[in-house]
Amino acid sequence: MKQQEQTNNTKKARLPGGMLVLLMVIVFIVLFTYLSLNLKTIDFGYELQELIEQKDQLQEEIDKLKSDKARLLNLERVEKEVTEKLGYQYPQPEQFIKVFDTEDQGPK
């Protein structure tokens, strides 16, 4: 009788075979989903870091290009290069030509 009670108690304590397999499958799915989401989060973190570094590099390049543009558009530098390298000169007063509109018959 005691042995039969022990057998009944162990049967009650155990899950049926199908339930155990189902529980293991559910646990596996949950763990797999968790791990895959965790890996995706890590991948996104690396990708975000790369994009931030790329943005910083592009911002540095933009700043450098703006500086170069300002330097190249500096009128004093342009005037110096034109007069020294190209040999341009300011016109003399007698080199000016006055141009009038066709409606305007001359200076008033």
Image: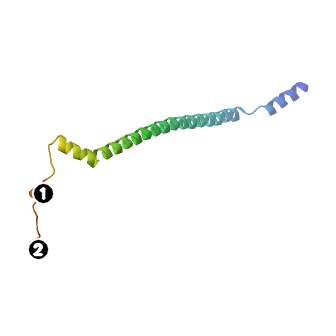
The quarter of the picture where residue 66 lies is top left
User: For the residues carrying marks 1 and 2, which lies nearer the camera in this image?
Assistant: 1
Instruction: Judge from the rendering whether residue 15 lies leftward or rightward of residue 52; answer left or right.
Output: right
- Against 19, is 72 above or below? below
Amino acid carrying label 1: it is Pro
- Against 74, is 94 above or below? below
The quarter of the picture where residue 28 lies is top right
Residue drawn at x 59%, y 37% as measured from the top left: 33
Instruction: Judge from the rendering whether residue 67 lies leftward or rightward of residue 92; answer left or right.
Output: right
Q: Nearer the viewer, residue 34 or 12?
A: 34
* 3D distance between C-alphas at marks 1 and 2: 23 Å
Residue carrying label 2: 104
Residue drawn at x 22%, y 47% as measured from the top left: 79
Mark 2 Cα shell of 10 Å, populated few (<14), some (14-19), many (≥20): few
Instruction: Judge from the rendering whether residue 82 lies leftward or rightward of residue 46; answer left or right.
Output: left
| First in sequence: mark 1 vs mark 2 | 1
Residue drawn at x 37%, y 43% as measured from the top left: 62
Residue 29: which disc? none
Residue carrying label 1: 93
* Quadrant where the C terminus is found in the figure: bottom left
Q: Position of residue 65 (x, y in %)?
A: 34, 43
Q: Nearer the viewer, residue 33 or 47?
A: 47
* Residue that lies at the very extreme toward the right in this rendered image: 1
Q: Position of residue 59 (x, y in %)?
A: 41, 42
Residue drawn at x 18%, y 41% as measured from the top left: 84
Q: Secondary structure at mark 1?
A: helix
Amino acid carrying label 2: it is Asp
